[in-house]
Structures are given as structure tokens and as C-alpha cells.
């Protein structure tokens, strides 16, 4: 199996290494505490660079089966995945999935000596414990050289270090094994979204990518497809839904229904057609303000610590929270930067007799992670 991009030889996962004889590319399956989303892509024959959406399916995650990024009830999640695969006739049994939030620890721009990669791996593994809050024996580690820098006349590598707890990753291994699927790689959700949106990237432009999903909001400052700064904020779409349910005395299902119709006031004088939606917007107002402040603080911290970069002027919203109406305008107004909603669908071909363009565009931010995972499957197959 690959963790985040590099081959692992650990005995605990060696049985899941990629099958070189498999024909179908791996599918992308994104699992949060809210949804399980599966995407299958294919490279169109005789049309280089044209990728076709073959299958896409979504179902609710069993209640309380995923918590803090960990699959706490693998059997129930596996059963739901098996049903999803059967109902939508997915052909591949190989899968790439993702972790997010505090499940993945991302440390960009760590400086290491410019030495052969084999030696560099040994140095990174030896020094990794300095950068992570867990014992080295309890985590899976991956790294990637993202560039070179000159420090006082000495050439060094810029290294991106990514780690995840073995206990957490092993719950995904177990889940897909129970679903009769082969887990060939684990990625980071924000990295998958970067890949899904790679065709939109402007060279040298600094972007802030915000994934508001499940229990967390993941923030990445990116340039040329590489993260320069990463932070996880412990507040996500589930936080908003649970607040609405608690403060308004609603069942969770009712709160979800209201959340999906949510409209955020931008300047404070908007009129609401639905009094329940208006009340819900008021209930999450302080949460939204807190999230905005955390995003602002993160951007300011990045600029203070990385003064060689120009000011960030562009923000990309993705995942479930990005579907909240007017949220892009709200952030733009509060943060003073341009904001757009991610839409990886526009880079895919698909049969409009099979897929509704309106449905795909409406849910594009929610599908971004799974699409990015499936694109990785195409690229590495």
C-alpha cells in the first residue's frame, strides 16, 4: 500500500501492495462522519488528457461509525460501501481513500541536506519525531521533496512531511478488507482536492484552500500545487449542524435539512423566505465568526512567518461547507480577498444522459476529494 504517495514496506500493510496485473484504475472513496462518496474515472481512449466520469455515488455514513477521522465501526461502514458498489455497478475493487483534519499531520517546508534520496529517507525517518506529537513507532510516515533552497550558501531540500497514526490508518485497512476491496493508497483530503483542481492552478499564484468537512476545517496555503502552510481547525459542517439541532431543539435529520438550505447574510440586511433558515443562520453566526477569525489568523501567521511571499488574494472553498449559499461572498467581504467555490466537474467529460449537469455542479465541492483520489488512480495506474 502507499501512504500519501510513497511505497511502504511495513509488514502490516505489505499484503495490500498494488496489483501490477490489475486493469481497472483504483476508484476514489472519500469517507467522513457524514458521507461516503465513491468516484470512478477513466482515461478516454485516443484522447490524451481527457478524463471521463464513469460512476459517482454517495450515501450517508452510518451514524456514529466515524469519529475524529477514525472508522470506529468498520463492519457497518464496510457494509454500506458494499451496498454502494453493488447498487452503482462499480467495476474496480481497488481503492484510494483519504484522511483529513487532525488525522493527518502535515509539516511543509522542513529543511534537510541535499543528499541522495535513499540517504535522505533515512535522515527524515530519524528526525521525524522532532516534528510530530506521537512516538515514531506509532505512525506511518511519508515525505516529498518540494524544492531546493539556499541557506547561507548551502543547498538544502524543502521537504513536505506527512504522518498519520497507525491505529487510525489500520481502521481504513480493516474497513476496505471487510468490504472485499483492496486499499492501495491513503492520501490527504486537501492534497486530493489540489489534484482535482490542478487544471485551474495559475503558476506562482498563492491560494488558500479551505475544506469545510465533517468535524474539521482544513486550511492549506498552496503554490504550484504544493502546500506551504497547513492547519486543521476543529470546526466543520457537522459542528454547524449539531449547533442548529441543539439550539433549535430539532432532531439531527431536521437540522441537516435546514443546513442544506442555509443562506448566510453577507451585509446583514438580507430577507429570508424561510423563518427556520433565518433562525438557523442566527444560531451559527458566532461559530461562523469564529471560523472566519481562525482563517484570518492563519493567513496573517503565514505572512508573518513567510515574508518572502506576496499577499494572498485568492481563496478556494471546497467540501460540504462550500455549498452554503453566500458563504463565498461572506468570506470575501470579511477577509477582503477573492473567493471561489471549487468545481472539479468542469475538467471531466461525462454522459449527460447518465449524469445531471445541474446535480453535478450543485454538489461539485462535495465531490472534490473523491474526484481527486480517483484522478490519482488514473495517474498511477
Image (tube, rainbow, N blue to C red):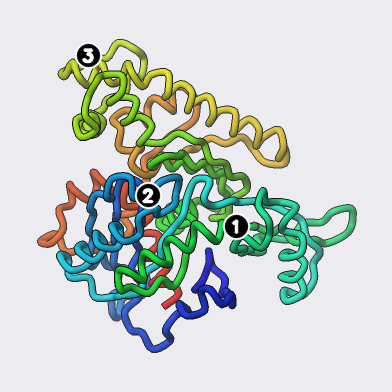
Label 1: how many residues lie within 10 Å, few (<14), some (14-19) or many (20+)? many
Q: Which residue is found at the position 63% from the left and 30% from the top?
A: 300
- Mark 2 and mark 3 in contact (Cβ < 8 Å)? no
Q: Which residue is found at the position 43% from the left and 43% from the top?
A: 211
Residue tagged by mark 3?
Answer: 271
Q: Compare marks 1 and 2 and give the one earlier in the sequence.
A: 2
Label 2: how many residues lie within 10 Å, few (<14), some (14-19) or many (20+)? many
Q: Which residue is found at the position 33% from the left and 45% from the top?
A: 64
Q: Which mark is residue 64?
A: none
Nearest to the observer: residue 88 or residue 75: 75
Residue tagged by mark 2?
Answer: 66
- Quarter of the rendering containing residue 377: bottom left
Asked which secondary structure carries label 1, the reply is strand
Nearest to the observer: residue 368 or residue 11: 11
**What x and y, as percent, mark residue 124?**
73, 64
Mark 3 → mark 2, Cα distance in angstroms = 37 Å
Q: Compare marks 1 and 3 and give the one earlier in the sequence.
A: 1
Asked which secondary structure carries label 3, the reply is loop
Asked which secondary structure carries label 2, the reply is strand
Amino acid at each position: 500500500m502507499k501512504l500519501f504517495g510513497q511505497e511502504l514496506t511495513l509488514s502490516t500493510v505489505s499484503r495490500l501492495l498494488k496489483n501490477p496485473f490489475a486493469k481497472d484504475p483504483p476508484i476514489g472513496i472519500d469517507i467522513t462522519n457524514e458521507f461516503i462518496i465513491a468516484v470512478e474515472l477513466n482515461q478516454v481512449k485516443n484522447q490524451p488528457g481527457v478524463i471521463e466520469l464513469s460512476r459517482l455515488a454517495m450515501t450517508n455514513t452510518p451514524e456514529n461509525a466515524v469519529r475524529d477521522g477514525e472508522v470506529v465501526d468498520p463492519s457497518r461502514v464496510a457494509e454500506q460501501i458494499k451496498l454502494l458498489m453493488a447498487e452503482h455497478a462499480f467495476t474496480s475493487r481497488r481503492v484510494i481513500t483519504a484522511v483529513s483534519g487532525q488525522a493527518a499531520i502535515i509539516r511543509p517546508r522542513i529543511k534537510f541536506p541535499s543528499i541522495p534520496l535513499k540517504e535522505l529517507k533515512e535522515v527524515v525517518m530519524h528526525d521525524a519525531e522532532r516534528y510530530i506529537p506521537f512516538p515514531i513507532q506509532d505512525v506511518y510516515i511519508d515525505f516529498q521533496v518540494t524544492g531546493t533552497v539556499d541557506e547561507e550558501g548551502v543547498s538544502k531540500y524543502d521537504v513536505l512531511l506527512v504522518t498519520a497514526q497507525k491505529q487510525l490508518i489500520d481502521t481504513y485497512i480493516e474497513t476496505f478488507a471487510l468490504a472485499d476491496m483492496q486499499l492501495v493508497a491513503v492520501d490527504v483530503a486537501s492534497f486530493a482536492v489540489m489534484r482535482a483542481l490542478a487544471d485551474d492552478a495559475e503558476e506562482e499564484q498563492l491560494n488558500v484552500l479551505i475544506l469545510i468537512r465533517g468535524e474539521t476545517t482544513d486550511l492549506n496555503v498552496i503554490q504550484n500545487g504544493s502546500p506551504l502552510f497547513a492547519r486543521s481547525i476543529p470546526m466543520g459542517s457537522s459542528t454547524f449542524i449539531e449547533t442548529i439541532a441543539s439550539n433549535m431543539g430539532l432532531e439531527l435529520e431536521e437540522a441537516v435539512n435546514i443546513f442544506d438550505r442555509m443562506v448566510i447574510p453577507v451585509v446583514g440586511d438580507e430577507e429570508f423566505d424561510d423563518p427556520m433558515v433565518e433562525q438557523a443562520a442566527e444560531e451559527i453566526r458566532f461559530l461562523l465568526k469564529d471560523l472566519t477569525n481562525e482563517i484570518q489568523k492563519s493567513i496573517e501567521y503565514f505572512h508573518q512567518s513567510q515574508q518572502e511571499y506576496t499577499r494572498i488574494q485568492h481563496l478556494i472553498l471546497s467540501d460540504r461547507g462550500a455549498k452554503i449559499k453566500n458563504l463565498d461572498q461572506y468570506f470575501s467581504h470579511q477577509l477582503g480577498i477573492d473567493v471561489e467555490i471549487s468545481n472539479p466537474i468542469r475538467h471531466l467529460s461525462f454522459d449527460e444522459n447518465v449524469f445531471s449537469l445541474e446535480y453535478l455542479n450543485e454538489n461539485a465541492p462535495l465531490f472534490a476529494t473523491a474526484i481527486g483520489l480517483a484522478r490519482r488512480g488514473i495517474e498511477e495506474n
